[in-house]
Image (cartoon, rainbow, N blue to C red):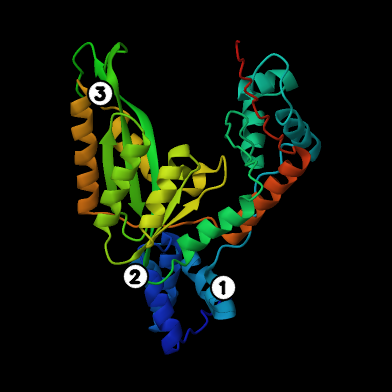
Amino acid sequence: MPRVAPAVSLDSSMKAALDQLVRSPSTPQGLVQRSRIVLAAAAGKSNQQIAGELQMPEVTVSKWRRGFARRGLEGLQDAPRSGRPVKHGPEMVQRVQNRACQQPQHYSRWSVRTLANDLKLPRSTVHQILVASDLQPHRIRTFTFSPDPDFEAKLLDIVGLYLHPPQNALVLCVDEKTGIQALDRTQPLLPLSAKKPRSWTNEYVRHGTQTLLAALEMASGQVVAHVKQRRTSVNFLHFLKDVIAAFPGCELHMILDNLNIHKNAAARRWLRRHPRVHFHYTPTHASWVNMVECFFSILGKQALSQSVHTSKHQLKEFLLHYIARNNQNPRPFVWTKGPEKLQRIIEATKEYQATHPRKPRRRRTVHNNINN
């Protein structure tokens, strides 16, 4: 005796949900077809009519119609599948993980091939286990723990400025990028073409270096910059004069590193003459706290990594033009390291400082020899 197709009735909310599944471009096609089956069944059509309109077997229409009648929208989902049986047992996975985390004897790092040869396993097996375990022995990251005893206080002070700047005040990140080389190539560049990247000769000519002094205003992304021959205290103070002129009428909180020209007597005198300016120093060996380093990274990738300059003057004009273009459409810089990550950094730094106490500096004694 043939099965009787169950009647399907939809309220307004269920019909709207099914219509949304059919219209949405992100809905999987299988679910779209099943939703159409239900909508057609609710319109009073038989399974045979629905199968003819949607060009699918009648048995498929019957299956999803019955599934919806029993379980609603859940009845339109695929049943869980067992999948392929596990090929690698936990012992093999543990073996690969342990060996990958050990330093190889004859190499500086593991590759998939060298690790597979060492373990006498297929390369595909080792690769699958490394990917599933999120182990990447080919990569290395750099870090430096700060020896600054006031690391936590300085870090939280600067992050507090980023997240909650004072009213009627601007936060400026100030630093210098030194040693920017004016590099020229000894032969003409070959342009980009199909299947061939842009090419240049590996021989180059140095035409000297320039130093970029930059102040990044966090809220807008605007940058005030000077390009100088050297990084000197005089150049730094002249640069600060232009910075405060660019942002009149409000307090300025400047974030700087611990370079001598930022903290010497001339800088302190300048600071006393400008009471609306406040200096905040980053912890020692913690340049990542200064957001202008992010701007320098963008500058390096976008402007300097493949640039060619025939003179220092040309390099200077190029840098100033890049800054001017940036200021035409600046974008704010946003601090993204949350409290949890900051707390991990603080605790790790405290642990390092506890196990590696800072050695006091030895004072040099100058002896004056008086010849009678």
Which quadrant would the C terminus be assigned to in this image? top right
Give the residue type that dot 2 points to.
Answer: Arg
Task: Label 2, secondary structure: give it.
Answer: helix
Pointer 3 local density, CA inside 10 Å: few below 14, some 14–19, many at least 20: few
* Residue 235, percent from left and from top: 31, 38
Q: Image quadrant of residue 261?
A: top left
Q: Which numbered marker is on residue 74?
A: 1
Amino acid type assigned to the residue bearing label 1 in the image = Glu
Q: Which residue is mark 3?
A: 198
Above-or-below relation of 122 to 152 = above
Q: Is residue 88 left or right of residue 204?
A: right
Q: Quadrant of residue 295?
A: top left
- Is 72 located above or below residue 307 in the figure? below
Q: Residue at x 23, y 23 (%)?
A: 308
* Residue at 40% across, 72% down: 167
Is any atom of residue 319 visible in this view? yes
Q: Secondary structure at mark 3?
A: loop
Q: Amino acid at mark 3?
A: Arg
Q: Nearer the viewer, residue 254 or 24?
A: 254
Mark 2, residues whose alpha carbon is within 10 Å: few (<14), some, or many (≥20)? few
